Structure formats: C-alpha cells, structure tokens
Amino acid sequence: MEHIDIVFVPPLVALLIGILILLVPRILNFAVAAYLIVVGIVGLLPLFH
C-alpha cells in the first residue's frame, strides 16, 4: 500500500464533501455542524493541557 502524504488529505476530504453536498444538499447542514464542532474542540484543546 502506498503512503499518502498528509498534505493531500484536506483537499481530498474537501472534494469528497463537496461532491456529497452536490448529490445530497441536506447533508450540508451536517457537514457545517460537524466542521464547527471539530474546529471548536480543536480550538479548546490547548486550554485543557
């Protein structure tokens, strides 16, 4: 199995989510909510260390 460089992960995720949103527009609400939750958790992590 070939090693995937970490640099390619965000664009691939963005592309897949973009295609899903085009196919199922209702998923946009869940995508935005998940993004905000993840960004919030990652932003708060330094406070707990």
Image (spheres, helix red, strand yellow):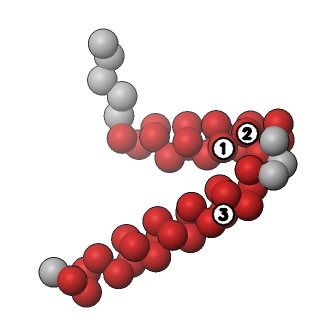
Give the structural element (helix, strand or loop) at label 3.
helix
Vertical placement of 49 versus 1: above or below? below
Vertical placement of 5 versus 30: above or below? above
Give the structural element (helix, strand or loop) at label 2.
helix
Residue found farthest to the left: 49
Residue toward you, 1 or 49: 49
For the residues labelled 3 and 1, say whether their Cβ atoms are less than 8 Å apart. no
Give the structural element (helix, strand or loop) at label 1.
helix
**Label 1 belongs to which residue?**
17
Q: Amino acid at mark 3?
A: Val
**Label 3 belongs to which residue?**
32
Q: Amino acid at mark 2?
A: Leu
Residue toward you, 35 or 3: 35
**Image location of residue 1, percent across then percent down:** 30, 13
**Label 2 belongs to which residue?**
20
Residue at x 65%, y 56% (from the top left corner):
31
For the residues labelled 2 and 1, say whether their Cβ atoms are less than 8 Å apart. yes
Q: CA distance from mark 2 to mark 1?
A: 5 Å
Q: Amino acid at mark 1?
A: Ile
Quadrant housing the C terminus: bottom left
Does 41 sit left or right of 27 as displayed? Answer: left
Residue at x 46%, y 65% (from the top left corner):
38
Q: Earlier in the sequence, mark 3 or mark 1?
A: 1
Does 44 sit left or right of 48 as displayed? Answer: right
